[in-house]
Image: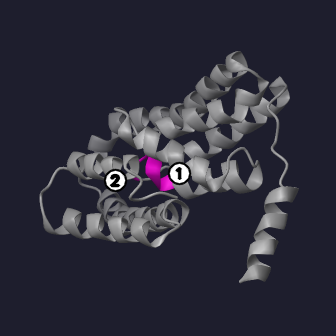
Amino acid sequence: MPLLLLTAAAEAASCAPMRLNDLGHLLQVMGTFLGLSLFSLGGGNTLLTEYHHLSVVQYCWLRPSQFADIYALAEAAPGPSSMIVGLLGMGAGWPEGPGWALLSAYGAEIAILLPSTLLMAVACLSWNRLRQSPWRVAFERGLGPITLGILFAVGVKILQTADTNAPGVVVSLLVCVLMLRTRISPLWFMAVAGGLGAFGLINR
């Protein structure tokens, strides 16, 4: 175990953040999100594992705990789950100043939303024409299991990132069970978890 901790520490120390200090780097990151946009099957959360890889492992903008905080903030705020991309862009550009951070945030958010939005608009205009086609039925049935599998993998990644101690794991498992077995609003779970964190009963 000590060897694993030393290896992880060495990897963290050798990871230099990619600076968005020029337009070329910013366009490179926007291009990455433009490509990811077309793979957001089932919503923005299906890309969360790739967001984590880009921001924590590849570009080293954030620590895992910071990524978990940004994800929680994006989920708590009203709006689509893809809002996390804007927050990631802001975090990446913040070392260059508030103005560049806002430019990075808007650039990343537009990049992740624009291609998928245009694709959905085109699909909606022509989808009804294929309502009797066996290809449409096969496509819709096939995407269900794929999307559920991706969402399950995303849930596991969030648990690995956010739960670093026993109380956090217990709370997460308890919430999962209650969500599956009851009709309690998720807002209550968020409120209770926030209270437990505020009093220091659960933490990272």
The N terminus lies in quadrant: bottom right
The residue beneath circle 1 is 68
- Structural crowding at the residue carrying mark 1, measured as other residues with C-alpha within 10 Å and reported as few (<14), some (14–19) or many (≥20): some
Q: Which residues are magenta?
A: 42-47
- Residue situated in front as seen by the camera: 133 or 53: 53
Give the residue drawn at x 51%, y 39%: 84
Q: Position of residue 165 (x, y in %)?
A: 49, 69
- The amino acid sitting under disc 2 is Leu
From the viewer's perspective, is the residue at label 1 or at label 2 nearer? 2
Ranked by sequence position, the earlier of labels 1 and 2 is: 1
Q: Name the mark on residue 33.
A: none
Name, please, the residue furthest toward the top: 99
In the visual, does 132 lie left or right of 172? left
Quick one: 40 or 157, which is closer to the camera?
157
Rendered residue at 69%/34% (across/down) = 30
Tell me the SS state at disc 2: helix
Residue 46 covered by magenta stretch: yes
Q: Position of residue 104 (x, y in %)?
A: 67, 27
Determine the residue located farthest toward the left in the rendered image.
Answer: 183
Q: Tag 2: Cα neighbours inside 10 Å, few (<14), some, or many (≥20)? A: some
Q: Residue 64 in magenta?
A: no
Circle 2 residue: 196
Q: Which SS does the magenta portion mostly show?
A: helix
Color scheme of the displayed model: one colour
| Amino acid type, residue under disc 1 in the picture | Ala
As drawn, 64 above or below 101 = below
Residue 75: image quadrant is top left
Picture quadrant of residue 141 = bottom left
Q: Secondary structure at mark 1?
A: helix
